[in-house]
Amino acid sequence: MKQLITLFVNDKEYEIAILPNRTLTQVLREDLSLLGTKEGCGLGDCGACTVILDGRPVNSCLVLAVQANGSQITTIEGVAEGQSLHPVQQAFVDHGAIQCGFCTPGMILSAKSLLEKNAHPTELEVREALSGNLCRCTGYQKIVEAVQTAAKTMKK
């Protein structure tokens, strides 16, 4: 039996009737057409499905959509500031921290969440914040450098 829930995604309210066993990833992608949230492993190991839920990065494949009822959710589609990329997004581009791009939305959201809580992270803190996000292409160094550059840019 479907349940009516309200999600606040990227500052927009959605009221949707869903089956209670559907994950937040499924609802974001299939019902709201927000395709930036990727389903990688479906087990919470890869971080491709990372979104910011009530201020915290979470693996949306592990969250039932009904658990997010009434929550504020930020997906990669809500990160840019108008027509301008967010500083974290721009730093990823500038540092070549994007290759295939599959992990990038989750990486950016994890980095954004870190920088909102810690404006001056050390390299170790950046690596720790990104430890739940797997990348098979970049080797992580360019990603870490991008986050550190974004931190400097965001301080201004």
Image: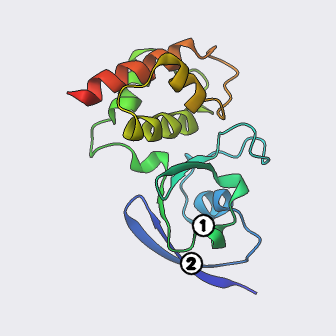
Residue at image position (57%, 39%) is: 106
Rendered image: mark on residue 82? none
Depth check, front residue: 33 or 61: 61
Residue type, numbered disc 1: Asp
Is residue 93 visible in this depiction of the protein? no
Instruction: Locate residue 10, reporting x and y percent.
Output: 41, 58
Depth check, front residue: 35 or 42: 42
Is residue 39 visible in this depiction of the protein? yes
Task: Estimate the spatial distance between the alpha carbons at disc 2 and disc 1, rounded to whole Å.
Answer: 8 Å
Residue type, numbered disc 2: Ile
The local crowd at label 2, few if under 14, some if 14 to 19, many if 20 or more residues have their Cα within 10 Å, is some
* Vertical order, 118 against 9 (above or below): above
Instruction: Locate residue 81, reporting x and y percent.
Output: 29, 44
Closer to viewer: mark 2 or mark 1? 2
Helix, strand or loop at label 1? It is helix
Residue at image position (50%, 74%) is: 70
Residue linked to disc 1: 31
Residue linked to disc 2: 16
Instruction: Locate residue 5, reporting x and y percent.
Output: 57, 79
* Vertical order, 92 against 18 (above or below): above
